[in-house]
Amino acid sequence: MAKRARSANLTETEKVLLTDLCLKFESVIESKRTDAVSRKTKEEAWQTLAAEFNAATTAAIHREPGQLKHVSDTLVLRIESRTCAGLLLLMGTGEMRLVRPPASS
């Protein structure tokens, strides 16, 4: 079996766009329900998210829903493991945003 070609990494701008789109679909894609209807709804949400992502980016690289889900999961893990060293997830206002602390001089 041949290995698939690896896609280019997402740029910082693409990561911010992906984060914003994930927040838009958060209630669906973060649902803990695992029944058939919920799984189908999640799949449709990831398809829509991928379509919006690909429409909003200027890169010639088409990203599949599975690729975007993997990147999203990786970003969340990095945020959770590096809150003291870099990215923070703020939920105090009911809104979630990726925030980069000011560069130390």
Image (cartoon, grey):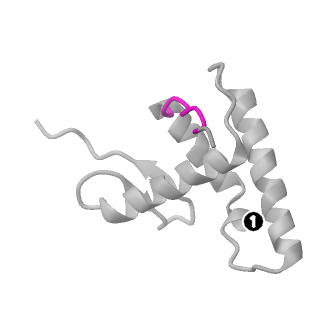
- Disc 1: CA contacts within 10 A as few (<14), some (14-19) or many (>=20): some
The magenta-colored residue range is: 3-10
Please indicate whether residue 19 sits to the left or right of residue 33 in the image.
Answer: left
In the depicted structure, whether residue 26 falls above or below residue 39: above
Furthest toward the left, the residue is: 105
Furthest toward the front, the residue is: 1
- The residue at the point 38 percent across, 65 percent down is 80
In the image, 66 versus 15, the foreground residue is 66
Residue 4 within the segment the image draws in magenta: yes
In the depicted structure, whether residue 14 falls above or below residue 87: above
In the depicted structure, whether residue 56 falls above or below residue 41: above
- Residue 46, position as x, y percentages in the image: 75, 52
Please indicate whether residue 68 sits to the left or right of residue 8 in the image.
Answer: right
Q: State the image quarter where residue 43 is shown.
A: bottom right
- The residue at the point 75 percent across, 28 percent down is 55
Helix, strand or loop at label 1? It is helix
The residue wearing badge 1 is 28
- Residue 101, position as x, y percentages in the image: 29, 46
Q: How many marks?
A: 1
- The residue at the point 66 percent across, 68 percent down is 30
- Residue 17, position as x, y percentages in the image: 59, 38
Quadrant (top left, top right, bottom left, bottom right) of the C terminus: top left
